[in-house]
Image (cartoon, grey):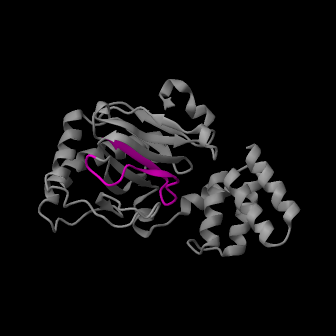
Amino acid sequence: QTWSPQDGLRSRLRRRPIWLLREAVPPEVAEAVVAAASASGGRLFNRDADSVDGAPTDEIVLLRDGRLTPTINVEMAPLLYRVQSVFERVNAYVKVQLRCPACLVCTSLLRKYGAEVSSRSGIGVHFDEKALATAIVSLDAQQNYVGGLMVQPSAARRSRRLVHMEQGDLVLHSYDLLHGVEVRRGARHSLIMWVSSDAAACESHSLAWKLRDARRGTVHAQYQLGRAQIFREAPGGASMGWRWLKRAAQLGHEGAQLNFGLREMEQGRLHEARRWWVKAFRG
C-alpha cells in the first residue's frame, strides 16, 4: 500500500514521527545532483559491503562526521558543489521540525537502486541506530521507477507502507522507524542524510541523546541502548544493557520482547520465554 500525509500514519506511529516536505529541493537541483553523480560513468560509487545486508552499497559518501569528502578525485568536485545547497536547506528544516537548534546533517550518502543503474534493487527494512533522525530526498521523477521508500511502524510486515515521493520531496523520520527501499522497475537515486544532535556528537559519534531519551521513557531508545551495551558498542556493560532491554520489553516494545524471550530461553526459563514471545506476537 502507498502512504500519503492524509493517511494519518503519523498518529499510528506513536513515538515514530515522520514528516514529508513537498518540493524541498527544486527539480533542477535534484537533476543536477544526479547528473554530477553519473558523469563519471559510475566510478564515484563505492562497492563496499553494506552493513545491513552485505551486498554492494552502490553509494557515494558525500559527508562524514560533518566534513565533506576530500576532493581527491576531481570528478567529485561538481557533485559536492551541488549537494551543499541541499545540506543547507535540510539543516534549516530539521532544526525546526525536531525543535533542536544544534541539530545538523552529520553524514550523507547518495545511493542508486534499480536494475537499469545498479546491482542493488533495494535494502531491507532496518533502523538507523547511529542517527538521531534521517532525512531522505528523492532525486528522480516518480514516473522513472516503480517502488521507493517503505516505512514500517511496527514489527508486523502488514504495517509496511510505500511513501509516495515526487522529485525533490524530502522525508524526515526519527531513529525508531523501520524503513527500507524496494525498486521493482526503473532507476531511483536518493540523497540520504543522517542527523546528529549537535556538532560535538557528530564528530565524536556520541549517542548521548539515546541515553537521554531512554531515561525519559522512550522505549525504542531503551531497546537500542540496551542492544548497544550488550554488544559492547556503547559504555555501560552488558548487565546494564539487559536491564534496559527488559524495561523496554515491559513497556511493550516488540523487538525487546522477542530478544528478552531469547535471553530467558538461554537461561532455561522456557515458560518466561514463551510469555514474552506471546506478548510480542500480540503486539
x and y, in percent, of residue 116 in the image: 26, 46
Q: Does the magenta stretch include residue 128?
A: yes
Q: Residue at x 35, y 47 (%)?
A: 91
Q: Position of residue 255 (x, y in %)?
A: 67, 54
Quadrant of the drawing holding the C terminus: top right
Image point 14% across, 56% down: which residue?
40
Q: What percent of the width, then of the height, locates residue 265?
A: 79, 67
Residue 92 visible within the image:
no
276 or 133: nearer the viewer = 276
Residue 58 is left or right of residue 149, and the answer is: left
Which stretch is magenta?
A: 116-138
User: Is residue 110 at least partly visible in the picture?
Assistant: yes
Question: Tag count in the figure?
Answer: 0
On screen, residue 265 versus residue 156, left or right, reads right
Query: Is 265 rendered above or below residue 134?
Result: below
Q: Which residue lies furthest to the top in this view?
A: 6
Q: Is residue 75 above or below residue 192?
A: below
Furthest residue toward left? 74
Q: Which residue is drawn at 59% across and 75% down?
A: 232
Q: Which residue is nearer to you in this view: 125 or 83?
A: 125
Query: What residue is rendered at 71% in x and 63% in y?
Result: 244
Horizontal side of 42 relative to 193 (left or right) equals: left
Q: Is residue 192 magenta?
A: no
Residue 12 location in percent, x, y?
62, 34
